[in-house]
Amino acid sequence: MIIRRSCFAIGVVLAAAGFTACQPANRDGPAEESAIVAETPPAGAFVAEYAARDYAFVGPAELPSGWVTIRMANEGLEHHFVSLTLLPEGKTIEHYFSDVGVPFDQAWEALRSGAVDKAGAGAMLGELLPEWYASAVSMGGPGLVAPGRTGQATMRLVPGDYVMECYVKTPEGEFHVNLGMAIPITVTDEDSGAAEPEADLDITLTNYEIAIEGTPVAGEQTVAVHFQEHPEFGLGNDVHVVRLEDDTDMDEVIAWMDWMNIEGLRAPSPAEFVGGTHEMPIGYTAYFTVDLEPGRYAWIAESGAALGMVEEFTVE
Ligand SMILES: [Cu+2]
């Protein structure tokens, strides 16, 4: 499995084009929408539709640059997400599998067999991951969503070769990415023409805080996530939304967020996730849309959950 950058490339230059025109939704996605609960795309969005299945992504292999809304309809029976990684120049998904995926698989096998603890697995990754992995850049993607839901996130993408992946685990502890949930995406020089979304709420992510501005209310909420700080090593800061029931065990949910835990990110999820976004480089903003029914929820980070990046909230 594949995923975590040890640091973030800082040299990504965004094309400062005008983002005023509107384009129709991309129709290359899955034909059937069936019973999927889907959020409304932001006004003027360029929308790319993907279906997440157990275990595959179905959708366009090519996207424009600029503001792009990725909608991932979870048609499977397990939770899924989209994590987008921009590869360094000259690297392909094959390099990603062989140079990055294999070390993560080895670290995971050592962890699950009890041969190493988390620190040992981290040391293994430090030794086995190639130098070029430090130049791979996390570029967001819709966060965790339960079966029957749609994850929707909008990012400003730069041209290049990306990998789209999901590294949730099956009940047997196999990463979805190893079962087909990793596809190459090319982001072209052509600009989407889409506008930057407008947000109902703002979240700023620092080490190790989820700072919320605004009050979530029932209905569709578009959340702007500002990436202000990331840990120097390991996974960056991201945010997901989880619905809490009366019997939800928060400690179990927090432990589930860490892939290094034997039960971490392993189906079935201890609670229902309804949206979020993966990390982007410092200074970037990602937008995600989530449909909130009245109830109890939490904003929760992946690697930061155990370090206090959990904020419960209630929607009246
Ligand atoms: Cu998945």
Image: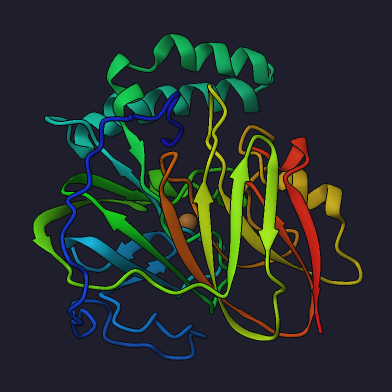
Counting from the top left corner in percent of width and height, residue 22 is at 20, 82
Placement of 156 over or under 246, stated as above or below: above
Please name the residue shown 30% across and 77% down the image: 45
From this viewpoint, is residue 115 visible?
no
Please name the residue shown 68% across and 59% down the image: 212
Res 31 quadrant in image: bottom left
- Drawn side of residue 120 relative to residue 195, left or right: right
- Drawn side of residue 111 relative to residue 15, left or right: right
Task: State the quadrant of the N terminus.
Answer: top left
Q: Nearer the viewer, residue 201 or 164?
A: 201
Counting from the top left corner in percent of width and height, residue 95 is at 22, 29
- Drawn side of residue 227 relative to residue 184, left or right: right
Placement of 133 over or under 245, stated as above or below: above
Res 63 quadrant in image: bottom left
Specify the color scheme.
Answer: rainbow
Please name the residue shown 62% across and 12% down the image: 120
- Drawn side of residue 146 relative to residue 30, left or right: right
Counting from the top left corner in percent of width and height, residue 124 is at 51, 13
Please name the residue shown 57% across and 75% down the image: 200
Placement of 277 over or under 177, stated as above or below: below
Most extreme residue toward the bottom is 34
Number of residue marks: 0
From this viewpoint, is residue 230 visible?
yes
Task: State the quadrant of the C terminus.
Answer: bottom right
Counting from the top left corner in percent of width and height, residue 188 is at 10, 55
